[in-house]
Image (cartoon, rainbow, N blue to C red):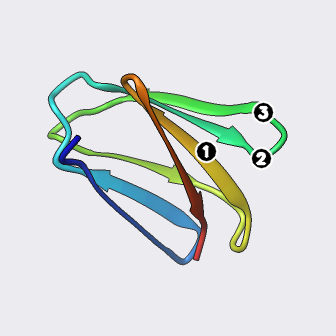
Amino acid sequence: MCAKLSSSCGLIYINKLNEGKKVMAYSADGRLLASKKATGGSVHFQAKTGSVILLKIGNETITTIVK
């Protein structure tokens, strides 16, 4: 995967995605928080600063802490 992940001010940004790529955000306890498809090669999610978020991008899962 070549996606670029960053977070700032309670937002998670995922760039360099293929158009239409599905990205799902889960809480640390496994609850689905949001599901979006990439438009313009990117998606973003809002989350509480300091929270642990699991991002499922295609067949890969990435864990991040929101800044």
Residue at figure coordinates x 40%, y 23% from the top left: 59
Helix, strand, or loop for circle 3? loop
Q: Mark 1 points at which residue?
A: 54
Alpha-carbon span between mark 3 and mark 1: 8 Å
Alpha-carbon span between mark 3 and mark 2: 5 Å
Type of the residue with mark 1: Leu
Helix, strand, or loop for circle 2? loop
Given the current orientation, which residue lies at the most extreme right position? 29
**For the N terminus, which image quadrant?**
top left
Give percent across and percent down for residue 63.
57, 52
Alpha-carbon span between mark 2 and mark 1: 7 Å
**Mark positioned earlier in the residue sequence (3 or 1):** 3
Residue at figure coordinates x 47%, y 59% from the top left: 12
Whether residues under marks 3 and 2 lie with C-beta atoms below 8 angstroms apart, the answer is: yes
Q: Name the residue under label 3.
A: 30
Helix, strand, or loop for circle 1? strand
Whether residues under marks 3 and 1 lie with C-beta atoms below 8 angstroms apart, the answer is: yes
Q: Which of 61 and 50 is in front in this view?
A: 61
Q: Mark 2 points at which residue?
A: 28
